[in-house]
Amino acid sequence: MATWQLQTAKAHLSQVVREAVQEGPQYIAHRGKSVAVVVSQTEFDELTHPKLSFVEFIRQSPLAGLNMDFAREQTLTSDIEDL
């Protein structure tokens, strides 16, 4: 992750983009203050892609249609053997 001065970034845009793809976000500074970030398309898609809710995630599971038996013993306590 590098910081580029605006004038340098403008003059070397191809290099800024290449490094964003290969090395990660590239920060652009103007008058000593960070004002923009160049990221790869892949990273941008990950940041902006809507996240699934937990319910949607479960519904898309390959196990979603299976009829599974999750029955368990209904006693209030369990016997634990002495070690």
Image: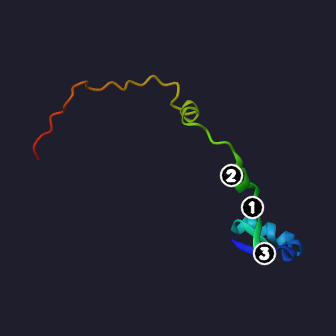
User: Where is residue 21, by image quadrant?
Assistant: bottom right
As shown in the figure, which amino acid type bears the numbered disc 3? Answer: Trp
Left or right: 53 as drawn, with respect to 3: left
As shown in the figure, which amino acid type bears the numbered disc 2? Answer: Leu
Who's the residue at 18% across and 33% down the image? 78
> Which of the two residues, 60 or 1, is positioned nearer the viewer here?
1
Q: Tell me the element at label 2.
A: helix
Label 1: few (<14), some or many (≥20) within 10 Å?
A: many
Who's the residue at 88% across and 72% down the image? 10
Label 2: few (<14), some or many (≥20) within 10 Å?
A: few
> Which of the two residues, 48 or 30, is positioned nearer the viewer here?
30
Counting from the top left corner in percent of width and height, residue 51 is at 63, 42
- Residue to which mark 1 is pinned: 39
Q: Tell me the element at label 1.
A: loop
Q: CA distance from mark 2 to mark 3?
A: 22 Å
Label 3 with label 1: CB-CB less than 8 Å: no
As shown in the figure, which amino acid type bears the numbered disc 1? Answer: Val
Q: Tell me the element at label 3.
A: strand
Counting from the top left corner in percent of width and height, residue 2 is at 72, 74
Q: CA distance from mark 2 to mark 1?
A: 10 Å
Q: CA distance from mark 3 to mark 1?
A: 13 Å
Who's the residue at 80% across and 66% down the image? 17
Label 2 with label 1: CB-CB less than 8 Å: yes
Disc with the residue nearer the chain's start (2 vs 3): 3
Disc with the residue nearer the chain's start (3 vs 1): 3
Left or right: 44 as drawn, with respect to 75: right
- Residue to which mark 2 is pinned: 47
Left or right: 42 as drawn, with respect to 51: right
Report the label total: 3
- Residue to which mark 3 is pinned: 4
Q: Is residue 61 above or below residue 50?
A: above
